[in-house]
Image (cartoon, rainbow, N blue to C red):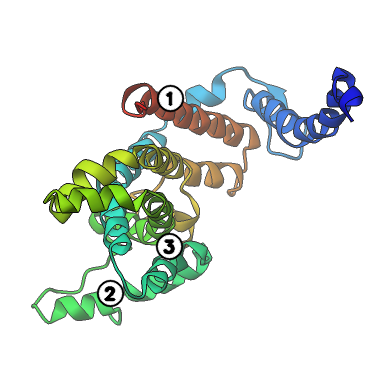
Amino acid sequence: MKHPLRNPFVYLVMIIPTLILYSMFFIYPMLTSSYYAFTDWNGLDNYAFIGFDNFIKVFSDSDFIAAIKNNMYFILFSVGLQVPLIIFFALLIANVKRFQRLYKTTVFIPSILSTSVIGILWGFVLHPNIGPVNKFLGFFGVESIFWLADEKWALPAILVVNAWQWVGFYIVLVLAAILALPKEMNEAAQIDGATGFQRAWYLTVPLIKPIISVVVMLSIAGAMRVVDIVLVMTNGGPVGSTEVMASYLVNEAMGVNPSYGLGTAISLIIFAFALVLTALYQLTFGKTKE
């Protein structure tokens, strides 16, 4: 075995099948999509090369600018509010002695449910007449709120539902990192008189910074490609108040007058935004010291 493994040709033979599959299903589709972004094509007829017209059209559309702002709201909500809650609940579950597995399973269940199921479920929960949220608020004299039909409340409602779906997945990731830490350090800090908050803030959180960094990056990437929950619950409405870049892409590429070229241009824009944001995070807050 030693003699064949010293031959670089052996490694090349092993790598070629993977490279072929990778090129067929990733490189080639990506390159063709990049080309179609510069064409006028509805996905069926012959296409015509139009240069940067698709990109100019997109950035001159006020609806797309509003969609970018909504994606930024998703990012701010995910990183600013969702991540601290993830860390808090992970620490809470890690310190529970009984039914820990039950709690882990319970928080993880929403992330394995279909988005269609979640959209229908929360559509009932937020129903203005029979929904339990408005029923509860009614006890305090609050009038019925049209959560998904009011421009003021539609986006916050979508943000909460999207967080409810994915928070459990990230909690399990952070919880696994916490449970993998040596118990001796926590016990030594406890003997030295450190309170539970001090052990969590000065010991546990610094040690799990790498996984927190991963959660933040995944949250940013998820916020940039969020689309399914928007399409299921509001389809970008009312009056475009919940439109995001990906739902704008779907409506333009597969709408009444489909424009595949415009859709691929938007997909490249989304990819560029996600790449720049994750790179900026890595260059600023994502660096961790050993």
Instruction: Check disc 2: other Cα within 10 Å, few if <14, some if 14-19, many if 20+.
Output: some
Which numbered disc, 2 or 1, marks the residue that appears first in the sequence? 2
* Chain-order first, disc 1 or disc 3: 3
Badge 1: few (under 14), some or many (20 or more) residues near its Cα, within 10 Å?
few
Of callouts 3 and 2, which one flags the residue occurring earlier in the amino acid sequence?
Answer: 2
The N terminus sits in image quarter: top right
Which disc is residue 269 wearing? none
Q: Which mark is residue 233?
A: 3
Q: Nearer the viewer, residue 51 or 83?
A: 83
Asked if the residue under mark 2 is in contact with the one under mark 3, i.e. CB atoms within 8 Å, the reply is: no
For label 1, the SS is: helix
- Tell me, yes or no, if residue 119 can be seen here: no
Task: Mark 3: give few (<14), some (14-19) or many (20+) Cα within 10 Å.
Answer: many
Identity of the residue drawn at 14% across and 48% down: 192
Name which residue lies at 34% across and 26% down. 289
Kind of residue at badge 1:
Ala
Which residue is found at the position 75% from the left and 29% from the top?
Answer: 28
Helix, strand or loop at label 2? It is: loop
Q: Type of residue at label 3?
A: Met
Residue drawn at (34%, 45%), measured in percent from left and top? Answer: 74
Camera-side mark, 1 or 3: 1
Query: Which of 195/113 is in front?
Result: 195
Q: Which residue is mark 2?
A: 128
> In the rendered view, does 84 fall on the left or right side of 221?
left
Q: Disc 3 versus disc 2: distance between alpha carbons?
A: 14 Å
The mark found on residue 279 in the picture is: 1
Q: Is residue 286 visible?
A: yes
| Lateral position of residue 251 relative to residue 223, left or right | right
